[in-house]
Amino acid sequence: MGQPPMQYLRQLRMQLASRLLVENGAKVVSVAAAVGFESEAAFSRAFKKCVGFSPDEWRRRGGE
């Protein structure tokens, strides 16, 4: 792994969320719950911090 466990887990959750947003077209609130977030707002902040785009923008861009 080469990284702390929490960092690895965060990266794994965001990879899954990225796929769900683009491939399944799932709503942000559903993706947030699927990857373990209790609120859409907390998920959106974490996603943007990790990926560089908001979940909606990521989906519009097709998951670059």
Image: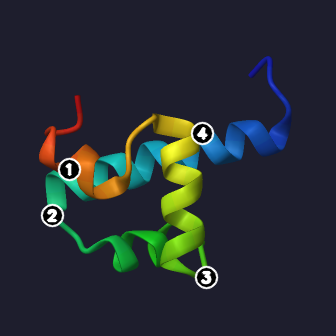
Q: Which label belongs to residue 11?
A: 4
Q: Is residue 63 above or below residue 32?
A: above
Mark 3 residue crowding within 10 angstroms, few (<14) / some (14–19) / many (20+): few
Find numbered disc 2 in the image and state the secondary structure of the residue it sits on: loop
Q: CA distance from mark 4 to mark 1?
A: 18 Å
From mark 3 to mark 4, how far is it between C-alphas? 18 Å
Residue at horizontal 44%, vertical 42%?
Answer: 15
Estimate the spatial distance between the alpha carbons at disc 1 and disc 3, rounded to whole Å: 21 Å
Indicate which disc residue 34 carries: none
- The local secondary structure at tag 4 comes to helix
Please report the residue visible at 16 percent of the width from the left and 52 percent of the height from the top: 23
Q: How many marks?
A: 4
Q: Nearer the viewer, residue 40 or 20?
A: 40
Q: CA distance from mark 4 to mark 2?
A: 20 Å
* Earlier-in-chain disc, 1 versus 3: 3
Tell me which numbered mark, 4 or 1, is placed earlier along the sequence: 4
Residue 41, relative to residue 45: is it above or below? below
Q: Residues within 10 Å of mark 4 (few under 14, many from 20)?
A: some
Q: Position of residue 44 (x, y in %)?
A: 48, 61
Q: Which residue is mark 1?
A: 59
Q: Which one is nearer the viewer's eye here, 43 or 18?
A: 43
Residue matched to label 2:
25
Question: Which secondary structure lies at badge 3?
Answer: loop
Provide the secondary structure element on which disc 1 rests.
helix
Look at mark 3 in the image and give the residue it sits on.
38
Quadrant location, the C terminus = top left
x, y (%) of residue 30? 36, 78
What's the residue type where badge 1 is placed? Arg
Assess whether mark 2 and mark 1 are in contact (beta carbons under 8 angstroms). Answer: yes
Asked if marks 2 and 3 touch (Cβ < 8 Å), the reply is no
At a point 47% along the width and 71% down the height, the residue shown is 32
